[in-house]
Image (cartoon, rainbow, N blue to C red):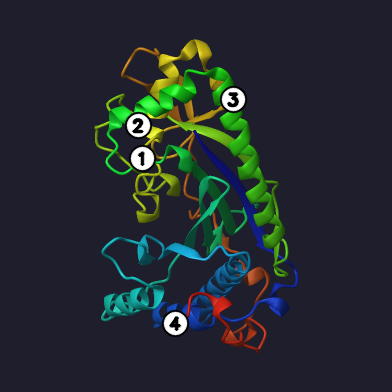
Amino acid sequence: MYFESNFDLKPAPNIKDTLERPSKVFKKIYSLVTGGLTPTERLQTEVMLSILQSVNVKLREIDIDHLVKLSADSTDIYCEKQNGPKDLSEAIQSFAVQMQGDSAKLYKSFMLVLTHDYEGLRFLIEISIKRRVKVGESPVHVTVSAVINEFKRALGETDEKLQDRLQKVIANSKLLAEKRKKYLKSFKGFVEKLNVQMSSIAHLEKTLEQITRAKMMVPHSRNCNSPRRRSQASSLHHDYYCLDDCTDYLWSWFFTMCDYASNSDFSSFELNDESGATLALSFDRYSDGIESSSTSGNDSDSDSSSSWIGDFFSGGDSGSSSSSSCSSCSSCGGGD
């Protein structure tokens, strides 16, 4: 059992007048990724990074400041790892070295991922922005996911002991319902707090009401020790350092519910595969095999997509934002 909510943001009509240029960390990234690009391409990149910066500032205002990942397309500018760079500035220096000698590349998207603990849940907040979108799509997408800290694997805890803990909850239908209700309420409360903060960004508007779900992952195998094929379809299923031991219970939850099928209400959950894709399921509760079909979507950056930035901005780089820069306060995105 875990939780997920999604909503989209679109540029407001006044974005040209209210959007501030990238500063500090985001300005450094802009300088690194725009060498050799055309003026139009530089403008598009600047607007994308400016929007991501403004979202980051608003999240920091409510103490959501634990950065997990910052990436351009599939290239990690920063990714929190046990033996990786200890801060964003160090990561950007490494990224600059990596960029040396490379030919100019126009990145299609940028993504910012943060984590936060709230009322017994560990959250991942993923904000992605695309340069090109299909007609009717929004360029900024927010995914909020959360796992339950109560079921985090304890130090030295085996798969068997972890599963025993899960069984005590799942075998008791009343207790399971109480847990689901409690954590879903906490999750919705956090998402609402996030929505209020996001709505205060002058140059962005929410286009869709968030869809909040209690979800359950369906592993390919009942064997807890099988290789975990984690896909980039969902941040929650990545091997992020901040989630070490926090998501292990997801691989046992589904089959434990199958073992107690008479007590389990599967209709209370959306079922997903290990990549996070929604499933249409046919299964025998005593079988290791799961027959499933994914309902995941396609990449929107296709030939039928176009850059949305031209609808709001025109001309050279000077038209990309207000002329004033951010102050050098610490809320601008992670330090020098």
Q: Residues within 10 Å of mark 2 (few under 14, many from 20)?
A: some
| Residue sitting nearer the eye, 297 or 245 | 245
Q: Residue 19: give x, y in percent of width and height.
A: 66, 76
Mark 2 or 4, nearer chain start: 4
**What's the amino acid at mark 4?**
Lys
Determine the residue positioned at 48% across, 63% down. 66
Tell me the CA gap for discs 2 and 3: 20 Å
Q: Which mark is residue 177?
A: 3
Name the secondary structure under disc 4. Answer: helix
Image marks 2 and 1: residues in contact by CB distance under 8 Å: yes
Q: Which mark is residue 153?
A: 1
Q: Is residue 294 above or below residue 25?
A: above
Tell me the CA gap for discs 2 and 1: 7 Å
**What's the amino acid at mark 2?**
Leu
**What's the amino acid at mark 3?**
Ala
| Residue sitting nearer the eye, 200 or 160 | 160
Name the secondary structure under disc 2. Answer: helix
Rendering quarter of residue 95: bottom left
**What's the amino acid at mark 1?**
Arg
Mark 3 or 1, nearer chain start: 1
Q: Which residue is mark 4?
A: 28
Q: Is residue 44 above or below residue 193?
A: below
Q: Is residue 111 above or below residue 119?
A: below
Mark 4 or 3, nearer chain start: 4
Q: Which residue is mark 2?
A: 162
Determine the residue positioned at 59% across, 44% down. 5
Name the secondary structure under disc 1. Answer: loop
